[in-house]
Image (cartoon, rainbow, N blue to C red):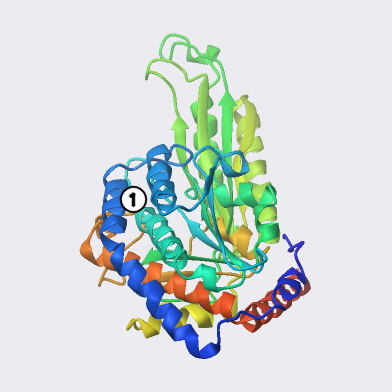
Amino acid sequence: MGVSQNAGVAERHCRVPSKVMADDVQQLKHRVCEAVERRASELIETSNWIHAHPEIGHQEVEAARRLSGLLQSAGIPVEMGTAGMATAFKAELGGQGADRPRVAILAEYDALPGLGHGCGQNLIGTSAVGAGLALSEVLPELQGSIWVLGTPAEESAAPNSGGKVHMVNAGVFSDVDAAIMFHPGTETAVTLDRSLAARGFEFYFHGKAAHAAGAPEDGINALDAVVQLYNAVSMLRQQVRSDVRIHGIILSGGAAANIIPDYAAIRYRTRADDSEYLSEVVERVIACAEGAAKATGCRLEWSEYMPGYENTMPNKVLLDLVSDNLRTLGLTVNNERRRSGRGSTDFGNVSRRVPGIEARIAITDHWDMPGHSIEFRDAAGSDHGRQAMIFAAKSLAMTAVDLLVDPEHLKRARVAFDDDVKRAKRTR
């Protein structure tokens, strides 16, 4: 489990107080909200375009161009290709004096294969950019800086996905004191609920082709191996903890019914509450694959097709700030969710390096609407979804103002982060 290499950095860089008095904070927040409203039409237009033209992970060329273009049009310098990813970007907004403290606002914009924006990333990307544009109008009066980070391939559907993991590994977040973002939801909630740690694997079975009717005894059936693995994993689910999720799809199962398949492949995602137990589950899934290969006479190859996602570690100090700002905007904010289901996100890796929080804002009135569905995709392109994106841009900008104006917030967030890290170590 990753631990920040940045301990104490936030405190060192927060000792110089902002010249802005506490009485002026509300005025600053009012100004960033006005700035978001002025840019609402172009934010909505961009969100609508991304929604109508979905691009999967690491192929979000046009989405990245349009989002970064909005920032560049406001005179904000943007670096493309951050951490070696063509569709990643980093926009730097500087305030008075030193660059620290620095708050990162995270954008996502990739879609799901065949479904489009069934997770609402079209709204996530534009909310982060909207917050950055608004903050550019007040940052000259503040200490510190803002990064708007374009993080591609959050969805695990693309090979080598997990843009935030690649950024973590490249050291991008070693220069960040807090990370904040928004995610569309079925209810407006900012909670301490943790996502599931997740890893992804592909298993490839190599057999021997033969005529399925004339000489089946001469063949080695690779599809049988995939089916054997699928059934073994289905039985394994009964023998693991209730938080574990193992789910997969068959990638290849043969070319024709009258040919014994000489090649078949399957992809699995494995998830659990924590990375340590997940490693045990992974070993058992691999053992199932090895057993299937031995039983059928196939040769097995396998790969981990993407980096692991750690479970999130939401920061209580940041949670309180975001919640208060959303309530100021007139939203009812729950700090517990009505739904118990959880997914996984590469934001987990970020939240275990720096204090972080991900706020969820409802894009529908139906709290039981499933994510990754046609209904959720439609909600992400609705008026309700667009309004949620505007609320998100405002609340992210307001929270960044809180963090840069009052250094005590970041100090307390760092203390809470360090306590969470210690607690996690004790429970291993």
On the image, which quarter does residue 364 sit in?
bottom left
Q: Residues within 10 Å of mark 1 (few under 14, many from 20)?
A: many
On the image, which quarter does residue 213 sit in?
top left
Where's residue 13, x and y in %?
72, 71
Look at 38% across and 15% down and name the residue there.
Answer: 258
The answer to which of 35 and 55 lies nearer the viewer is: 35
- Judge left or right: residue 325 versus residue 352: left
* Extreme residue toward the top, this view: 214
- Judge left or right: residue 410 versus residue 123: right
Classify mark 1: helix, strand or loop: loop
Residue 425 in view (yes/no): yes
* Extreme residue toward the bottom, this view: 23
Where's residue 231, x and y in %?
51, 43
Where's residue 132, x and y in %?
46, 62
Count of numbered labels shown in the rendering: 1
Where's residue 350, x and y in %?
62, 60
Question: Which amino acid lies under the numbered mark 1 shown in the image of this protein?
Answer: His
Look at 70% across and 58% down and name the residue there.
Answer: 174
Look at 66% across and 81% down and name the residue there.
Answer: 17
Quadrant showing the N terminus: bottom right
Look at 38% across and 39% down and name the residue there.
Answer: 62
The answer to which of 107 and 256 lies nearer the viewer is: 107
Quickly name the residue at label 1: 117
95 relative to 191, above or below: above
